[in-house]
Amino acid sequence: MKNMVEHRTDNYRATDRLSADEVGEDHPAEHTRQGNRIADMNSAGAKISRLWLAGFAACVFSLTLFAYQPFYRNAAPATFREHTIAAELTGGYQVVVSDINHDGKPDLLAVASGLKELIWFENPGWQKHVLIAGISRPINCAAWDIDGDGVPEIALAHEFSNVPAQSPGVVSLLKHKGDPTKPWKMTEIDRLSTSHRLRWVDIDGNGKKVLVNAPLAGASATLPDYKGAVPLVFYRPGVWKRETLSEELQGVVHGLIASHWRTKQREDILTASFLGIDLFTLEKDKRWRRTRLANGNPEAWPKGGSSEIAVGALGKDRFFCSIEPWHGNQVVVYRQQDKTWRREVIDTTLNDGHVLLTADLNNDGLDEVIAGYRGPGRSVYVYSLEDAKGTRWSREVLDDGGIGAAGCAVADLNGDGRLDIACIGTATANLKWYENLPPARQTK
């Protein structure tokens, strides 16, 4: 199934260029013609010259056509085969890719808020293992190998509620006890109301990541407006002392990612909140700087701002995208125009949008956008750029009603060199992976 989703129909015309007959006097072909007029040639030589000029002009025209070809639609869209890994994951919320048992294969961590345990599934057979039992309302986790033993430590946010007064917001660290397939040791790090998004981020550019914690809302905020400041904090491994990164965000903070926004070494932080999309960078003086990239959905509070954030690339051109507003219906792409980011809504049909990723799924150098939602309809879509201006995107259905997607992740799960997709569902309480199939062979 394929739909076209577009809001403007500006088309890039690859044939809008100089023809071979419009070259100026400084063009090599014009100098050749002048030389031919001056030279004393016989008729055979003149014919050869004319044939040479015609061939040269055709060559120039062909090279010009090649040079001006648009960078979109370099390959056919990726196709996928669906596999179900698990069911009965009550309140399925997040799936994380990590090599849990140090065997070189990417495994899947599954966070399900309705379960009392944190579990992982071992690649390739997807055997289930319990990391920790006896927990309450887990909401997010992040995996990173702190001590270099090849097995990641796992940060977990649990005892969560979207009512701040009822959400202790416990942050714990899980570490294996020798055998990653057996239960792990859990140590509490902090308690911060509505701790909701955890990410490991290399803020210093030295490979030693810190744990960033973005609560959903401020401790004193109340529904439905969630008025008030939201702290953004981080912890350095070993010390585990809470350090404040910012207290400038307001309302609900729902999206948090790390990105090499400025340099290839140091990672910066991007957030999606009621205020829109913000970039946080650690400056040379060790102070954090916040830069507003976009305001998000233009409606009034609490219907404004953004919910999710992802960064992608179209060739050498960077873009970012968002679901707007909070748990919203819009998929929005932002592409840079001069010094501003142009907002383009490419879809308005999501129902409780909760998944947003970018990835080059068909290996053509252009990232696709992956978006999914939890409400009625319960689908996941893949969007591909159709024109160079970024105003026309095609939409492919990855899953049509079979998963109430709350979280997805992208990785090469079967080692074939193509990126696969894993998703976990809330209302559907399931975990699936979608195998990226080889391109169909062309037949004569």
Image: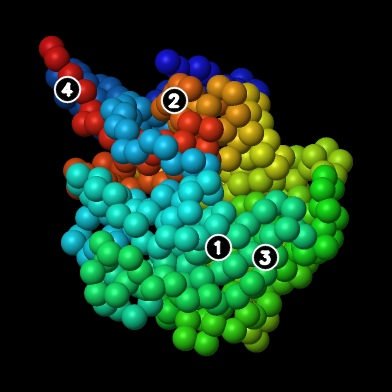
Q: Position of residue 114 (x, y in %)?
A: 53, 46
The kind of residue on which mark 2 rests is: Gly
Q: Is residue 417 visible?
A: no
Residue bearing mark 1: 157
Q: Dot 2: within a 10 Å radius of its alpha carbon, few (fewer than 14), some, or many (20 or more) residues?
A: some
Residue bearing mark 4: 441
Residue lying at 59% horizontally and 23% vertically, measured from the top left = 376
The kind of residue on which mark 4 rests is: Arg
Residue lying at 25% horizontally and 52% vertically, measured from the top left = 122
Q: Nearer the viewer, residue 238 or 51?
A: 238
Q: Are marks 1 and 4 in contact (CB under 8 Å)?
A: no
Q: Residue 402 shows which numbered tag?
A: 2
| Circle 2 SS class | loop
Of circles 4 and 3, the one toward us is: 3
| Quadrant in which the C terminus is drawn | top left
Q: Dot 3: within a 10 Å radius of its alpha carbon, few (fewer than 14), some, or many (20 or more) residues?
A: some
Residue lying at 24% horizontally and 31% vertically, measured from the top left = 437
Of circles 3 and 2, the one toward us is: 3
46 relative to 423 in the view: left or right: left
Residue lying at 25% horizontally and 45% vertically, measured from the top left = 126
CA–CA distance between discs 4 and 2?
Answer: 29 Å
Q: Nearer the viewer, residue 440 or 354?
A: 354
Sequence-first tag of 1 and 4? 1
| Circle 3 SS class | loop
CA–CA distance between discs 4 and 3?
Answer: 55 Å
Q: Dot 1: within a 10 Å radius of its alpha carbon, few (fewer than 14), some, or many (20 or more) residues?
A: many
